[in-house]
Amino acid sequence: MHPALSVIFFTTLSGAGYGLLCWAALGALGGSASPRTLLVATLLALAMATAGLLASFWHLGKPMRAWRAFSQWRTSWLSREGVAAVLAYVPALLFAAMLLPAMIGPHALGEPVVYGARGIAVALALLACALATVACTAMIYASLKPIPAWGHRLVLPGYLGFALLCGGLLLAALDASQAGRAPSPMAAKALLFLAAALGALKLHYWRSIDAAALPATRGDAVGLPGRTVSVVERPNTEANYITREMAFVVARAHGERLRGLALLLFAIAPLACLLAIGRVPGIAPAAWLWIAAIAALAGAFVERWLFFAQARHVVTLYY
Amino acid sequence: MTALPPPSKKKLGLVIDLDTCVGCHACAVSCKEWNAGGIAGPLTDSDPYGKAPDGVWFNRVHSYEVLGDGRREEEDGESCASSPSSRLPSPDMTLHFPRSCLHCETPACVTVCPTGASYKRAEDGIVLVDEDKCIGCKLCSWACPYGAREYSPVEGVMKKCTLCVDRIYNEHLDEADRQPACVQACPSRARHFGDLGDPESDVSKLVAARNGVDLMPEFGYRPTNKYLPPRPRRAGGDDARDDARGNAGAAGDAQATNPLKWLDRILGR
């Protein structure tokens, strides 16, 4: 599939934004982060989600009609994603408003706020909306049967994993910058686990899609199952929409190299940075965490490019 | 609404005969001609007379080589005609394959549409795009395994075969002309239009008689359009058949030039 930069920007940037919203909600529920960190995290997350949503407009032929995409949530995952993405702004803005009084109070940097029932409800709603948005994004791809690499059962966990890893590293980096402290042992363990699990998940996914053939043959495509069919002449001398959009081919050697780069950036670099915190004198935890967060985002971008470029569409059988 | 309507009684569609299609592209050209000015028009081109002409087509004709029955790629080079068996396998052949929208019973291109621009008509099952609602997200083209939908970068919307909905019900046209442009243009009568929901219709009878097939039925989209597979070809012509019967090569040559033998061969088809 043709890797459109606008869609890759959208899924990685918004994914990380919604992941950060999840962690902000969890941070409030767990009472581990200061109100200022949470407020900055919420605003950064909303900025990332908004930037991603705007980027996704670039690939639309008629962006001014985008509002129509909220209408078909009964059948379309893309529509559901749009609804969930916008719906998440409601608890996110309420959450930010809730943090404001504590932010200007005397304990802005210190003690975490203890939230009432209403606060817990808002944080839970934010968590649910953010997770639902990322899940809908994944389901847009996972529901397309003609692209078997996207229908793989690891696609949904992969999207959630990338959102949570990027978001978690960003919140840890923000917290370390604001409060100047290393992440709590529990947070550090969670991030280490996420990075390692995501690395293993993608390795398994890549091996699995490399081994799987398309679910149909060219014989099936022309209604002659079991026969050996080869192309004599294409319908047109030049490329067309179908070949440009669906028949994108990335050289195997390049693919391998990019997979290595992605793995290095989103799994190995964050693991190394998290383990290095406090072990190298003179380097603050915040520096390690920002490196880890930016590496993970860059890795997610490379991985998402490959997710498109290496996915084969059944329609390529005709060409 | 992108929710699918309950299955219609009437299922308008095409039956395409791969036995008689000669790959002349007349269907594709007449489709382009009609639809450039029809309800789905314009069918935009970019650089049409330049170095890399590009444009939207609802119908594209592919040409393939099909190896003889039971033959696989790895056996290539081994001649079928020299096979000594009495039951000769069919020879390799050329297959011309017109590809267009199949107007599926359960089309994923409709249900994935976020705007409601894509829809399946409840009355006759035709799948259409409302170009005034389409946002050009291209998701429907990803959802179709048959490559039926093409994006027009000029207009920013998705385009597809309309089954010439503006011809088949058009009372300004003679009754005989109320069929899709591709069907009318086909010089070898390889395209047939009709109601595939009615088992008594000509197209349904044709499909039954010729064992018409769905393309890639395993995807579960239940195409309305059917393809008639090519009839079995005789292997290697009459000489080979004679050889297989044990006749000498020279006798075979003599027989092949005999006008009566020639007539017999033509009538025997």
Image (tube, coloured by chain):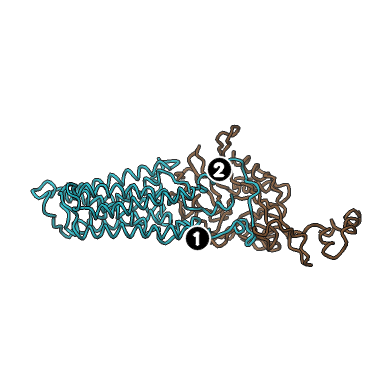
Query: Which amino acid type is shown beneath numbered disc 1?
Result: Ala
Give the secondary structure at mark 2: loop
Closer-to-camera residue (A52/A290): A290
What residue does disc 2 label? Answer: A240
Q: Is residue A319 among what the camera can see?
A: yes
Q: Are marks 1 and 2 on the same chain?
A: yes
Residue B220 relative to residue A138: left or right: right
Q: Chain of mark 2?
A: A
Q: Chain of mark 1?
A: A
Q: State the image coordinates of residue A230 (x, y, percent, origin top left).
A: 64, 53
Residue at far bottom of view: B86
Q: Quadrant of residue B87?
A: bottom right
Q: Quadrant of residue B206?
A: bottom right
In the rendered image, what is the letter of the chain coloured cyan? Answer: A
Query: Which amino acid type is shown beneath numbered disc 2?
Result: Asn
Q: State the image coordinates of residue A122 (x, y, percent, origin top left).
A: 22, 56
Please name the residue shown 82% across and 61% down the image. B241
- Mark 1, other Cα within 10 Å: few <14 / some 14–19 / many ≥20: few
Q: Quadrant of residue A114?
A: bottom left
In the rendered image, what is the letter of the chain coloured brown? Answer: B
User: Is A158 rendered above or below residue B61?
Assistant: below
What residue does disc 1 label? Answer: A212
Q: State the image coordinates of residue B122 (x, y, percent, origin top left).
A: 53, 56
User: Is B31 rendered above or below residue A130?
Assistant: above
The answer to whether marks 1 and 2 mark residues whose Cβ atoms lie closer than 8 Å is: no
Q: Is residue B11 among what the camera can see?
A: no
Give the distance between the C-alpha atoms of the residues marked 1 and 2, in whole angstroms: 27 Å
